[in-house]
Image (cartoon, coloured by chain):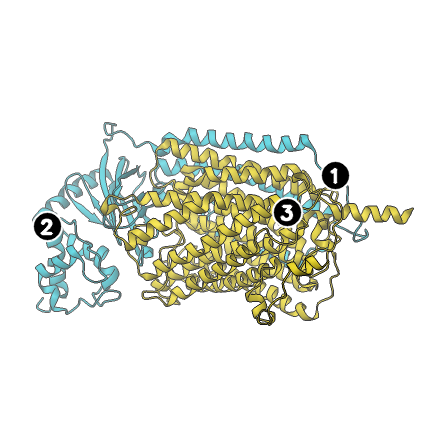
Amino acid sequence: MRRPPALTACAVALLALAATGAALAGNGGIAPVEPRSPNAAGIRDSYWLILAVVLVIFVVVEGLLVSFLIRFRRGRRQRFEDGAQLHGNSSLEVLWTAIPVVILFAVVAFVFVKLPGIRNVPSADAAAGRLDVTVSAHRYYWQFEYPNGAVAVDTLRAPVGQPVRLTVTAPDDDVIHSWWIPALGGKIDAIPGQTNSTWFTVDRPGVYKGRCAELCGLLHADMLAWVEAVPKAEFDAWLEREAAAQRAGTSQLGEQTYTGVCAKCHGLAGGGDIGPRLDGSAAVSDPAGVEKIVREGRNAMPAVGAAWSDSQMQALTGYVKERFGSGG
Amino acid sequence: MAARAESTPAVPAWQRGKVASWLVTTDHKRIGLIYIVSSGVFFAAAGVMALLMRTQLATPNAGVVTRDSYNELMTIHGTAMVFLFAMPLIAGIGNYLVPLMIGARDMAFPRLNALSVWLYLLGGAVMMLSFLAQGGAAKAGWTAYPPLSLDLGTGQDLWILSLHLVGISTLFGAINFIVTIHNLRAPGMTWTRMPLFVWSMDVFAWLLVAVLPTLSAGLTLLLLDRQAGTHFFDPSGGGSPLLWQHAFWFFGHPEVYILILPAMGIISEVLPVFARKPIFGYKAIAFSSVAIGFFSMLVWAHHMFTVGLPNVLNVYFMIASMIIAVPTGMKIFNWLATLWRGNLHFDAPMLYALGFLSIFTMGGLTGIFLAAFPVDWQLHDSYFVVAHFHYTIFGGVVFGLLAGLHYWWPKLFGRLLDERLGKASFWLMFAGFHLTFLPQHFLGQLGMPRRVYTYGEGGLWEGYNMASTVGSYVMGLGVLVVLVNMAKTSRSGRRAGNDPWQANTLEWYTTSPPPEHNFDSLPPVTSPRPLYDLRRKLKEADAV
C-alpha cells in the first residue's frame, strides 16, 4: 500500500521532535523532571513502570491496527464484497477482559508498594530531625514561616538532607492555589479554611523552581516559587541570623516582600502595571497609609498583607518609603 | 381516508415561509440540522479562541492577548466546546438519526424537542454575548472553582445563566431520547437488534438524567453565594470550596463519557460498513457502553487527588478509575477484531474512524498515569492533563463525530462529500492534532501548569510550545477544508441515492434526504443489520 504522504511527514516530524527533546534535556519531558527528593523519586519510579506497561499496550494495539489495515485492505476485491462474516467469540471477550484486569492489578500493586515512600512524612524524631514550615498561599505569592518565627516570600530556603514538612494553607478570604515544585514531589492544594501537608528531603544543594498549579486569577502564571537548598550547617546559621535580623528590622525582608508581593502588579521598579505607579508617589512615604492599604486592600487590590506581622509590615513600609518616597 | 385528513390540519400560511418554517418546525430532522449547524458555528468560535490562546503561547512573554482576555478565552473555549459544540452536535446527529435508525416517524415529543433546541441557542447566545458584559466574560475556567468564581464580574453570572439554559435544554433532550428509544422502535427491533449508535445514545441520555441535575444544583448554589449572600462554597463564611468540586465532578467526569459514548457508537456503525463485516462482539460492545456509563459515576474524585482527601478515598478512586479502562479496552479490541479479515475501504468516514481508534487508545493510556494518584500528584493540572483530555475529547469525540458527519452527510443532504477533500482534511487534522498535543505531554512533565497566560524564556518550553502552536494552525486548516468540502458539495456533489455505502441500518432504506414522515414502509428487522439481510434476500431471489 502506498503510504499517504501526510502520514510519513507526520511521523517524521514527531520523531524529530521527540528526538530533539530527548537529546536536549536528558529526558525532554518523556518523564517527570529529575527527582531531587525521595517522594519525587517514588513518583518517577511509578511513572516509569506505568510508561513501560503503557508502551507495550500501545505497540500491541497500534501494531495490530496498522497490520490489519495493510493486510485486509480492499486491494483488487469488489467494493461491496463481503469480508468474513464473524459475529464474535466469547473466549476472546473473556481473554481481553481478564488480561487488562491483571495488568491494572499489577500497576495498582506497584503503586501501593511505592506509596508509603511518597506519602508518609518522615517523623519528627528521626535522626536528622525535621524542619516544619508553614506555607501560606496568597494572590499571588507564597509566604513561608519557619519554627523560629522568621518569614520568607516566594523563596523557601531549606537544608539539604533534612526532611522538611510543609503545612500548606491559604487565608479564608483568598482562593485555591496549589504548591508544586516538580523536582521535589507532587502537588498539594492550598485551600482556604483547610490545611494540607506535604514534605521533601532535598538531596543536593541547588535552586528548584515551581509554579502555582491551580488557576488563582489574573496573575496565576506569575505565581512562582523557589526552594533554595543549602548545606544544613549553613542553613541553621542562616535561619538564626535571619530571625534575629527580622526582629531587629535589619533584614532584607522588605525588599523580598516588595519583589514577591507588590512588584507583580506595581512593577519591579515601581513604574506601575496592573497597579498604579509607586515611584515618586507621595502615598508611599506615609507608612501608616501604606499599611492601611496593604492590610485592607483598595479597589481591585486585594488585602495582600492582612496577616503580616508588624515586623514584616514595617520592613515593607520602610522599604517602599526609602526606595520610592519623594523625600527618600 | 377522510378521518386522517381531518386530524392533520393545514399548515397556516405564515408558517410556510422559508425562515418561518424552520422557526416553527417540530420535525426531528430539521431540529437536528439546526443543532448541527449551530454547534458548527460555536465550534468555529471556540476554535478561534483556541488559536488565539495558542498564538499567545507560541513565544514566551508574548502580549498577543491580555492576561484578562486570556482567562476569558480559556474559560469560554472550554465551556463552549463542551456545552455548545460537542453535546449539541451529538444531540443534533442523534436527533436526525435515532428516529431513522429505529424506524420511527419522529422523536417521542416533537414540541419538547423544538423547545430544547431553542433553549440551547438562547443559552449559547448568552455565553457568547457575555464577552460584552461589564468586566468581560467568566474567567474562572470551565470548572469555575470557588472561591475564585465567587468574586469575579457579571460574566460569571451570565455563565451560570447560560449553563442553566443549556442544562434544561439538554435534560429535555435526554428525556426525549430515552422515551423515543424505549418506545418507538420498529416492529422486530428488540434490544439486541438495535444499532449500537442507538445503544450509545440511550446510555448518553440516561447518564445525563442521572448527573446533570447535580451540576444544576451546584450552579444554583454558586449563584446564591454570589448574589444572595449565602456561604455554601465560601470559606470565609464557613462554607466548603470542596463541596463545589464534588458537585462539579460528579457531573463533570460522567460528562466526558457522555461525550465519548456516542462517538464510540458512531465508530461501531462506521467500522462494519467500511470493513464489509458485522460488528465483532455486538453484545459485548453494547454491554460495555452500559458498564462505562455506570462506572463513570463512581470515579469523579480522581479529579481531586491533590485537594488532600483521606488516603482511603484516593485509593478507592484510583482503583475505580482503573476499572473503567476494562470495558473501554473491550471496545477497542472488538473494533480491532471487526477489521480482521475485512474488505477495508479507506473512505473519509473510515479514515476518521480509524483516526479515532488510534488516537483514543493513546488518550486512554495516558489516563492510567493520572488514575495512579501519586503520579497524578505530579501531573495534575499540568499540560500533561491538557494533552490527555484533548487526546480523548478532540482525538476521540471530534474525530468520532467527524466520522459520523462524513458517513451520514449523504443521508442528510442527498449528496456525497468530495473524497479527495475529505481525505485531505483528515490528514491535516491528524498531523496537526499530534503536533499540537503530543508536545503538551512533555511540557507538563517539565513543569508547565495549565491555564497560564505566558511563561518565561529558556529550555525546551519554547520549542514545544511553538510546535504546539504550529500544529494548531494545521488543524485549523483541516477544519477549513472540511467546511469547504461541505459548502462545495452541497450544490455540486454527486447524488447519493438511498444507500451509497451499502450500509446495514434502517436510515439507509429511505430516500436521501428522507421525506418528512421518514418511511413509506419498513423492511422486517430480524438482526442488527436489516439492510444487509434485505440485500441478501434480494440476491437469493435473483439467483432463483
Please name the residue that numbered disc 2 is placed on.
Answer: A310
Q: Which mark is residue A86?
A: 1
Task: From the top left corner, tell me how far across and down residue B347 is, in percent.
Answer: 70, 56
Q: Is residue B26 above or below residue B178?
A: below
Q: Is residue A322 left or right of residue B415?
A: left
Which of B98/B145 is in front?
A: B98
Q: Which chain is yellow?
A: B
Which of B519/B462 is in front?
A: B519
The amino acid type of the residue labelled 3 equals Leu
Which of B466/B533 is in front?
A: B533
- Work out whether mark 2 precedes mark 1 in sequence or the reverse, and give the earlier one: 1
For mark 1, name the chain: A
The amino acid type of the residue labelled 2 equals Asp
Please name the residue that numbered disc 3 is placed on.
Answer: B184
Report crowding for label 1: few under 14, some 14 to 19, many 20 or more residues within 10 A (C-alpha).
some
- Asked if residue B358 shows in the view, the reply is no
Task: From the top left corner, tell me how far across and down residue B257 is, in percent.
Answer: 52, 45
The amino acid type of the residue labelled 1 equals Leu
Measure the C-alpha gap from mark 3 to mark 1. 30 Å
